[in-house]
Image (spheres, grey):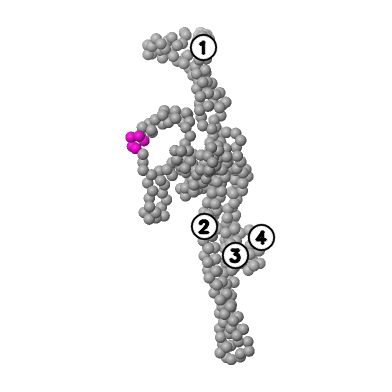
Amino acid sequence: MEQNNIYTEQRSLQQDTDQEIDLVEIIRKLWKNRKFILRVTLGFMVLGVLVALLSSEEYTAGSTMVPQTSEKSMGGGLSGLAAMAGINLGDVGGGEALSPKMYSKILESIPFQKELMQTPIKFEEYEQPVTLFDYFTNEDYKKFTLGGAIKKYTIGLPGVIIKAIRGEKKDEIYKPEAIGALQTLTIKEKKCVESLKRLVTLNLNEKDGYVELTAVMPEPLAAAQLAERVQTLLQRYITEFKIEKVQSNLDFVQERFDEVKHDFEQIQQERAVFKDANKNIYSARAQTQEEQLDTRYNLALSVYSELAKQVEQAKIQVKETTPILTIIDPVTIPLERSKPKRALILVLFTFLGGFAGIGLVLILPSLANILDNEKLRKLVTE
């Protein structure tokens, strides 16, 4: 047992010694090849500078909103005021509130995107505002960037080749009578929608209950204008979705009220003319006609009064149902670009170059032996 313990301790000491020797050997090899590591690092630094300088500038604008919706039942104060006017509101909460989780779906919907792409945006280099549709689809507004060109003919080269083989697709526009109420997109519209979905984002913080809207554009003023437009459109679409049912009820009651009001005013005028013309006449026939006019008048007045109450009830219902997006942090014009972060890019490429140089020093000798390549052996000093 004692001999086994001694053997185990000696073996452990030998392993520790071997590990120290290996670590010292690695450090020695790295120090010998420090110039090679430095050259690789400098090469990556130069590449980082090029990436930082050639990357397109982006500015981000946005706002923070809190959805405010009414409860299913009416508020006590408003119900009390309505009861004083003789209006029985009942259950007019307008149904369940539209979940904020659906806001992003509304933003991505085709009707929303088609309306958004027609928004005119003022850019610094153009005298007149340019619609988002023209900006993203018209070749006249495309800026040439060296970084974009390199990306197009390197990473995007397969797509360029496929597009050249297939040819340019025709931007088909369907006739309205052919599609009816169906939504459709042309090829240019689809391209614009894809760009807008990439540049406009909506994030919901379920824990704290607020919504963050961000819009990215190559100019600060354009980014702020896009964010403001999306915010306005989103609130309108949310309102329309939420009050669609109660608004249709209000429109119907209002239309019926206008008809009854017209009939009531006619009967009222006819009754007044008859009474003025028969002040001193006491014939049975005149009294019968007067009674008939009074009956028609009272009936019309009853219907008119009831519909007037229903109109007010429907208006209150619309007001109660209308959701509100409370703006906590409004849209402001950004002062600094969000991308590219040139200092961060340079630091990342420097560290990447250092790790790449160390990795090459350790890997190249083994790779040279496997490939039996004399040039690879000469790159690293053993």
Q: Is residue 5 above or below residue 337?
A: above
Sequence order check: which comes first, mark 2 or mark 1? 1
Residue 266, image quadrant: bottom right
Confirm whether residue 289 shows in the render.
yes
Q: Which residue is mark 4?
A: 77
> Which residue is farthest front?
127
Q: Is residue 53 magenta?
A: no
**In the rendered structure, which amino acid carries the disc numbered 1?**
Lys
In three-dimensional space, the C-alpha distance between marks 3 and 2, rounded to whole angstroms, equals: 17 Å
Residue 40 image point, x, y percent: 49, 17
In three-dimensional space, the C-alpha distance between marks 4 and 1, rounded to whole angstroms, equals: 81 Å
As helix, strand or loop, the secondary structure at mark 2 comes to helix
Q: Which residue is mark 1?
A: 35
Residue 377 image point, x, y percent: 42, 10
Q: Residues within 10 Å of mark 1 (few under 14, many from 20)?
A: few
Residue 312's disc is 3
Query: Mark 4, mark 2: which one is toward the viewer?
Result: 2
Q: Is residue 279 above or below residue 81?
A: below
**In the rendered structure, which amino acid carries the disc numbered 4?**
Gly
In three-dimensional space, the C-alpha distance between marks 4 and 2, rounded to whole angstroms, equals: 25 Å
Query: Mark 4, mark 1: which one is toward the viewer?
Result: 1
Q: Which residue is mark 2?
A: 244
Residue 213 image point, x, y percent: 56, 42
In three-dimensional space, the C-alpha distance between marks 2 and 1, rounded to whole angstroms, equals: 72 Å
